[in-house]
């Protein structure tokens, strides 16, 4: 079904912005590695922009192979130390107008526009063509980002060129860590294709003590946390642990209530998300974005709550599910 | 347990070893993935295709790039300084207090299905952190580097913890939908998704209690850090 805005279009906007940023990097003489850094982001933009064109020209399989090869290339550029960072852009004597609290308007407009679009425009159509497809929230975020950029230019009297030079400064602080979440998601996909989860299920079932209910509850919660630490994503751990331990033993043998077993099991997995570098978009990228010296600073701040919450979830499950 | 059961696990020791040796994480992850795929008998071309395919389904993780130009422009025009100035008008505001307020706001908004109102790029870096640093320096003077690190890490942590232990309550977000689909696939019928959401509430309350105890103690830690560095 055709819609007015599709997720592919959102990806193309991200791709075009990345092209603009890689030009800004290319022309940034303060970055000693500006050529390889620009190459890194250009490869990334290529992967975002060309899947449709490649698919039409060579078919889906070859298109995915070319994009896969580009992903491997960009990992190699970053892995071999090709991504560097430049200094903050000079002001070139541009005067900075004091704008006071109007500065908050563009960033506060983002949630407002996201909510307005995803609640107000969801399911609506213009001339018989629906506006959003099933990824409405993400598409609404893209609309909101463009509106916010326009507002930011209006409020500060800045230009988009200036905005992309500043985006270059921000992306330099994050560096190659910016694409770590995507590479980890790819690894998750490889694990799924290799049926790594099935192997972990076999291992857990071997360990399961079938008669001590509390021990099974504890193993289920702990298993969710540990498997999430390995995979970086509780959604990947959930089907494995729930079908390996929760359904056959806790529900079918011991008569537990499925709803709390599922809900609390998932949250036990989130305790793992809080302490693993594999959940890079939550734990590693913010550390880079906030310019922390310690790459694991965010994880260290989260660990005490994560451990306490894991224990709390085991106790809650034992009392609420039976 | 057979060899066939063990081979798909080969990526895990590679990941642990690679991270322990502090090799570049991108390389470690790529090598772990390729080794796992080879171990289960995939051909090289098949692996490259799988990588491309999974890249395309993970594109939503690149969406943060959309807001960088806007945030960058506002920061250049003093957004962070303005946030700090705004909060310094409230002399009773403290870093721990602001974080506690943000925690409740973030957890509540996620629970009613609005996980998009916060964000590390759009909220934590440009607004929350400058407010916290502003409030802390009104109380303790110039902040030592250790305190700045602590405040920033705690801000990122509140964003994550409040989101994780709030979003499971709302029935139309990923987690509840996944659990609902899983139950139906496995032949367990008659569980209303609303019930799954409701059973996430006790954990949400536990998270709020546990983390607010830690946040209440944060202001004392900041004051202690500042006093120690004054003495040096």
Image (spheres, coloured by chain):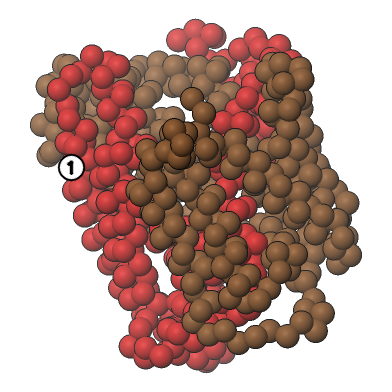
- According to the picture, the residue beneath numbered tag 1 turns out to be B198
Judging from the image, mark 1 belongs to the subunit labelled B
Q: Is residue A114 above or below residue B27?
A: below
Query: How many numbered dots are placed on residues in this image?
Result: 1
User: What chain is colored brown?
Assistant: A
Give residue A47's position: percent from left, percent from top.
Answer: 71, 35
Residue A127 position, x and y percent, is: 46, 37
Against A121, is B209 above or below?
Answer: below
What residue is drawn where x is 31% and y is 20%? Answer: A243
Please say if A82 is above or below B84: above
User: In percent of the image, x 89 and y 65: which residue is there?
Assistant: A29
Using residue B80 as the reference point, say whether residue A311 is left or right of it. Answer: left
Q: Nearer the viewer, residue B155 or B25?
A: B155
**From the viewer's perspective, is A313 left or right of A83?**
left
Image coordinates for residue A265, horizontal then vertical, percent: 28, 35
Q: Residue furthest front?
A: A127
Q: Is residue B62 visible?
A: yes
Q: Which residue is drawn at 35% across and 56% down?
A: B162
Describe residue B25's horizontal placement relative to residue A306 as left or right. Answer: right
Question: How many other residues sit within 10 Å of disc 1, few (<14), some (14-19) or many (≥20)?
Answer: some
Depth check: give the residue in front, A26 or B182. Answer: A26
Letter of the red chain: B
Tell me: residue A194, above or below residue A72.
above
> Where does the image place residue A288, in percent across and percent down from the top left?
62, 59
- Report if residue A314 is visible in the image: no
């Amino acid at each position: 079904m055709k819609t007015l805005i599709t997720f592919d279009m959102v990806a193309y906007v991200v791709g075009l912005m990345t092209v603009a940023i890689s030009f800004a990097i290319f022309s940034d003489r303060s970055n000693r590695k500006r050529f390889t850094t620009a190459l890194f982001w250009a490869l990334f933009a290529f992967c975002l922009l060309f899947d449709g064109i490649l698919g039409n020209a060579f078919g889906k399989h070859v298109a995915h192979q070319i994009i896969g090869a580009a992903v491997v290339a960009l990992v190699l550029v970053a892995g071999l130390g090709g991504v560097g960072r430049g200094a903050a852009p000079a002001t070139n004597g541009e005067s900075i107008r004091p704008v006071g609290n109007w500065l908050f308007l563009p960033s506060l407009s983002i949630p407002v526009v996201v909510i307005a679009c995803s609640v107000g425009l969801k399911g609506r159509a213009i001339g018989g063509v629906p506006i959003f497809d099933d990824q409405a929230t993400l598409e609404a975020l893209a609309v909101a980002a463009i509106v916010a950029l326009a507002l930011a230019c209006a409020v500060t009297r800045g230009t988009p060129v200036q905005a992309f030079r500043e985006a270059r400064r921000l992306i330099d602080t994050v560096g190659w860590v910016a694409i770590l979440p995507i590479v980890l998601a790819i690894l998750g996909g490889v694990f799924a294709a290799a049926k790594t989860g099935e192997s972990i299920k076999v291992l857990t079932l071997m360990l399961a003590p079938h008669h001590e209910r509390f021990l099974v509850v504890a193993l289920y919660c702990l298993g969710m946390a540990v498997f999430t630490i390995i995979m970086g994503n509780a959604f990947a751990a959930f089907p494995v642990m729930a079908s390996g331990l929760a359904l056959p033993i806790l529900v079918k043998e011991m008569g537990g209530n499925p709803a709390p077993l599922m809900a609390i099991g998932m949250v036990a997995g989130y305790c793992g998300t809080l302490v693993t570098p594999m959940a890079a978009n939550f734990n590693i990228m913010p550390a880079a974005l906030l310019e922390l010296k310690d790459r694991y600073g965010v994880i260290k701040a989260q660990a005490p709550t994560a451990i306490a919450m894991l224990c709390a979830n085991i106790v809650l499950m034992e009392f609420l599910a039976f | 347990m057979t060899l066939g059961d063990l081979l798909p696990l080969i990526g895990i020791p590679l990941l642990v070893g690679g991270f322990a040796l502090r090799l570049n994480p991108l390389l470690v992850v790529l090598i772990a993935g390729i080794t796992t795929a080879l171990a289960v008998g995939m051909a090289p071309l098949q692996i490259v295709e799988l990588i491309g395919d999974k890249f395309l389904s993970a594109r939503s993780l690149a969406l943060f790039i959309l807001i960088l130009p806007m945030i960058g422009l506002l920061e250049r025009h003093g957004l962070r300084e303005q946030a700090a100035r705004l909060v310094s008008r409230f002399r009773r505001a403290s870093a721990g207090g602001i974080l506690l307020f943000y925690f409740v706001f973030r957890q509540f908004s996620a629970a009613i299905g609005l996980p998009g109102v916060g964000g590390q790029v759009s909220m934590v870096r440009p607004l929350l952190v400058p407010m916290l640093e502003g409030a802390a320096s009104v109380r303790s003077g110039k902040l030592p580097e250790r305190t700045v690190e602590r405040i920033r890490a705690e801000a990122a942590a509140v964003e994550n913890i409040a989101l994780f232990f709030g979003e499971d309550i709302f029935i139309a977000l990923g987690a509840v939908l996944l659990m609902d689909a899983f139950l139906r696939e496995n032949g367990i019928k008659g569980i209303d998704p609303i019930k799954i959401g409701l059973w996430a509430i006790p954990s949400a309350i536990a998270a709020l209690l546990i983390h607010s105890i830690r946040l209440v103690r944060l202001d004392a830690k900041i004051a202690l850090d500042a006093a120690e560095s004054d003495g040096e």
